[in-house]
Image (spheres, rainbow, N blue to C red):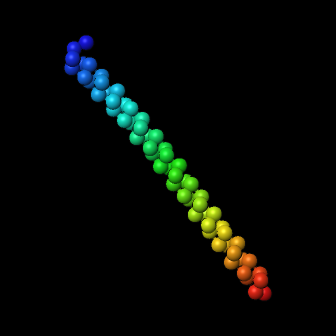
Amino acid sequence: MTPNTAKTCLSLSGTKSLVRTFNSLIDIHSCCRSIEDLQEQEKDLEELKASKFTKNNES
């Protein structure tokens, strides 16, 4: 194996692990987005319940 081949192999494996890291970051990011969306929906649901509750009490 010539020094150049070794360098290429090394940079390729480096790129592979970078890509892997990047992909797991994307997974984490999309997971966080899902959690945020769920929390938003939960908040909306609470507000909906609260508004229904006050409407029922007024009548």
In the figure, is residue 52 to the left or right of 2? right
Query: Which residue is depicted at the point 77% across and 81% down?
Result: 56
Image quarter (top left, top right, bottom left or bottom right) of the C terminus: bottom right
Image quarter (top left, top right, bottom left or bottom right) of the N terminus: top left
Q: Position of residue 28 (x, y in %)?
A: 49, 46
Query: Which residue is depicted at the point 30% across and 22% down?
Result: 9
In the figure, is residue 37 to the left or right of 15? right
Determine which quarter of the picture holds residue 50.
bottom right
Give the residue furthest to the top: 1
With respect to residue 50, does 4 lie above or below? above
Give the residue furthest to the bottom: 59
With respect to residue 56, does 9 lie above or below? above
Determine which quarter of the picture holds residue 11.
top left
Query: Which residue is depicted at the point 25% across and 23% down?
Result: 7
Query: Which residue is depicted at the point 40% across and 41% down?
Result: 22
Determine which quarter of the picture holds residue 14.
top left
With respect to residue 31, does 23 lie above or below? above
